[in-house]
Amino acid sequence: MNDQQLLRYSRQIMLPSIDFSGQERLLASRVLIVGLGGLGSPVAMYLAAAGVGELVLADYDRVDLSNLQRQIIHTSERIGMQKVDSAALTLTQINPDCRVLKCAEKLEGKALLEQVAGADLVVDGSDNFATRFAVNDACVATQTPLVSGAAIRTEGQISVFTGRPGDPCYRCLYGTGGEMDETCSQNGVVAPLVGIIGSMQAIEAIKVLTGAGAPLAGRLMLLDALQMEWQTVKLKADPDCPVCSGRGAA
């Protein structure tokens, strides 16, 4: 770590739970962020600012006017631009030392598995069950930690899935998903809600990568933003889970 880095990250290094060694682990980490929308925006910005060495940005969508109410990594001037390109511009301005890799194609199958296997941690900021399940399955297959978040209307949730045998995975929580697949475009979302959940995802990622504190593994936090009430639910592995009970491949 050079003098500029020591100064840039000094406020984190002075925390006993992170210290110099934790900051070095962040600098050596590679994080895959799936989705650069309302959740992925604060996740990417805070992880870049915090000193994660390499961020892999995965999103095949383009910036739309309707995104700008909540997807703060993008700007009005970038409407029509690939989200990965727009996000990379913002992250480079925040921290030019952060290495940014872009994946503008839909990640699935072998390509998804390879990207997950090459990451120290995955943050899921997607907005549909198909993607969340695919990311979860790849994380289970490679035993890669997954920080999962979701936000819709005025409600949000966040959890951490370790990928380790015996611990619950995302499918233990939702099974096949079924008719619960809802998106912000169909139901709406209040802008700061995704900032709250996305920022918490960034904190959980930092905790997992540095070993600080107690990550939300085995716990699901639920937020009712209208009442500003939090609820924490304990999670257990489903013995009949089609993914993690038999440690199935993605």
Image (cartoon, grey):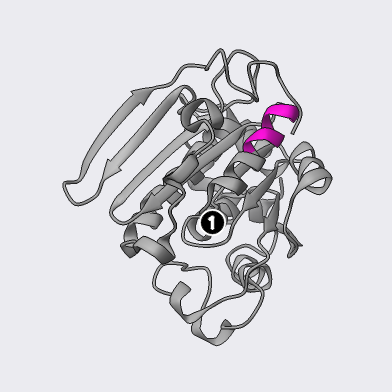
Q: In this view, does 101 lie above or below 165?
A: below
Q: Residue at x 41, y 61 (%)?
A: 184
The reply, left or right, for residue 110 in relation to residue 135 is right
* Image location (x, y in percent) of residue 142: 75, 29
Label 1 crowding class (10 Å Cα cut-off): few <14, some 14-19, many 20+?
many
Depth order, front residue of 75/17: 75
| Residue 98 visible in the current orientation | no
Q: Where is residue 149 in the image (x, y as percent from the top left)?
A: 47, 44
**Looking at the image, which residue is at 82% across and 42% down?**
114
In the rendered image of this protein, does residue 127 appear above or below residue 204?
A: below
Q: Residue 58 occupies which quadrant of the picture?
A: bottom right
Q: What residue type is labelled 1?
A: Gly
Residue 141 part of the magenta-drawn span:
yes
| Residue 226 showing in the rendered view | yes
Task: Please give the range of residues in magenta.
Answer: 136-142
The outermost residue toward the left is 227
Verify whether residue 173 appears in magenta: no
- 24 left or right of 185? right
Which quarter shows the N terminus? top right
Q: Position of residue 61 (x, y in %)?
A: 63, 69
Q: Between residues 104 and 1, which one lies in front from this camera angle?
A: 104
Q: Name the main secondary structure of what is drawn in magenta.
A: helix
Q: What element carries label 1?
A: helix
Residue for badge 1: 40
Q: Residue at x 75, y 49 (%)?
A: 108
Residue located 20% across and 46% down the image: 228
Q: Residue 129 in the image: x percent, y percent?
A: 54, 46
Is residue 67 shown above or below 28? below
163 or 242, nearer to the observer: 242
Q: Residue furthest toward the front? A: 179
